[in-house]
Amino acid sequence: MSSRRDAVHEILRQSEGFRSAQDVYAEMRAEGAKIGLTTVYRALQALADNGHVDVLRTDDGESVYRACASGDHHHHLVCRRCGRTVEVAGPAVERWAEAVGTEHGFTEITHTVEVFGTCPACSAAAKAG
Amino acid sequence: MSSRRDAVHEILRQSEGFRSAQDVYAEMRAEGAKIGLTTVYRALQALADNGHVDVLRTDDGESVYRACASGDHHHHLVCRRCGRTVEVAGPAVERWAEAVGTEHGFTEITHTVEVFGTCPACSAAAKAG
DNA sequence: GTGCAAGTGAAAACCGTTGTCAAAATCGCC
DNA sequence: GGCGATTTTGACAACGGTTTTCACTTGCAC
Ligand SMILES: [Mn+2]
Ligand SMILES: [Mn+2]
Ligand SMILES: [Zn+2]
Ligand SMILES: [Zn+2]
C-alpha cells in the first residue's frame, strides 16, 4: 500500500463519522499534504474494495467513507442530526435477508441496511434549546 | 395534480420494477407523449415527496422510482441483473431496527433496507447462455 | 376578455465522479 | 550505484445524472 493511500486511511481513522472524498482532500491539503483529488478518490475506492472502509451514499448522491473499527460485516446506526455513527452487528437481519432472498429463488444475495435516529446528545440539546 | 404528473405516475404503475427518470421519459416520448425531461424529473420528485412512489439509488448514482402496490411500509428484493423487484414485508427486520436504535438511546428511529440478488430467470439465462 | 398563478421544457449550469496521459516515484535487477 | 520496467500520481478534461434558469404556455377565477 502506497504512503498516500495510508495517509487517506489515517484521516478516516481519526475521523468520527463519515467523510466525503472532497472533504478528506480539503483536510489533507489544509494540513499541507501534497496530494491530488484524483488520488484521494482512488485511495478511497481501493480501501472500500478491500473492505478496509465502508461507503454509503448520502441522499444527495455523495459517497461518504468511514474506517470501520471492525473488519467484519456490520451495519450503522446514524444520528440524523449530527452524523454520529454506531457500528452494530445484526445476526437477525442477516438471516432475514438471506431467507427472504432464497424464498423467492434469488441467489448471490446481498443487502444494505442503515438505521437512522436522533442520538441521546442531540435529543438532550433539542429539549434544552 | 397536473395531467402530466398523472401520466408519469401511470407509467410507473404499469411498470414491473424500478424505472429511472430518463427511462420513463424515453418511454413516454416513444409513445408520442409531449413532455420534457425536466417535467418528468419534477413529477417523480413530487410523487416521491408525497409518498406515492418510492425511490432508491443505484450503485452508479442513478435515482430509480417505483409505484408501490402496497401503501404500507415494506422493503424490496431487487434483481441486480434485470431490476425485477419483489415487495417484501419484514417484521423481523422492523423489530431489529427499532431494538438496535433504542438500545443505543436513539429516538425517532427509521431505517432503510434493500436486498439484492440474482433472480431465477436471470440465473437460468446465465446458465443457458 | 383580463390578470395572475402554476406548469412546462429547451438549454445551460451544476457537481461529484471518472478518464486521460505525461511526469514522477518506486521497484527489480545487475 | 546505474537503469529500464512498472506503478503511482495529479492537473485537467470529460462524463452523466440532476437541477436551475427563464421565457413561454396553460388553467382558472373574476
Ligand atoms: Mn462501519
Ligand atoms: Mn415498494
Ligand atoms: Zn446526534
Ligand atoms: Zn433478474
Image (spheres, coloured by chain):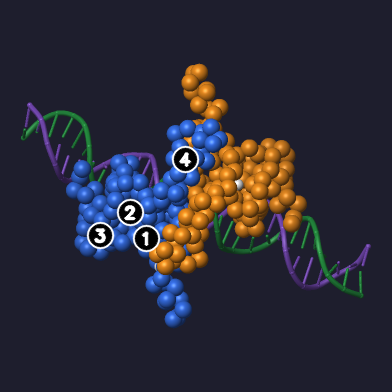
Chain colours: A orange, B blue, C green, D purple
Q: Nearer the viewer, residue A125 or B27?
A: A125
Residue B121 in view in this figure: yes
The label shown at residue B98 is 4
* Residue mark closest to the camera, 2 vs 4: 4
Closer to the chain start, of discs 4 and 1, is 1
Q: Residue at 37% across / 63% down in the picture?
A: B84
The span from disc 4 to disc 1 (Cα, nearest Å) is 25 Å
Residue type at mark 2 is Arg
Q: Give whichever of A91, C21 is nearer the camera.
A: A91
Q: Which residue is mark 1?
A: B85
x, y percent for residue A32: 73, 39
Q: Report if the beta carbon of the residue with label 4 is closer than 8 angstroms to ligand 3.
A: no
Q: Chain ID for label 2?
A: B
Residue located at (58% from left, 48% from top)? A89
In this view of the protein, can residue B64 be seen by the observer?
no
Q: Badges 2 and 4: C-beta atoms under 8 Å apart?
A: no
How far apart are labels 2 and 3 at the CA level?
10 Å
Residue where numbered disc 3 is placed: B14
Spot the residue most to the top: A128
**Ligand 2 lies under 8 Å from the Cβ of mark 1:** yes
Give the amino acid type for the residue marked by disc 1 in the picture: Thr
The chain identifier of the residue carrying mark 4 reads B
* Amino acid of disc 4: Glu
Say if labels 4 and 1 share a chain: yes
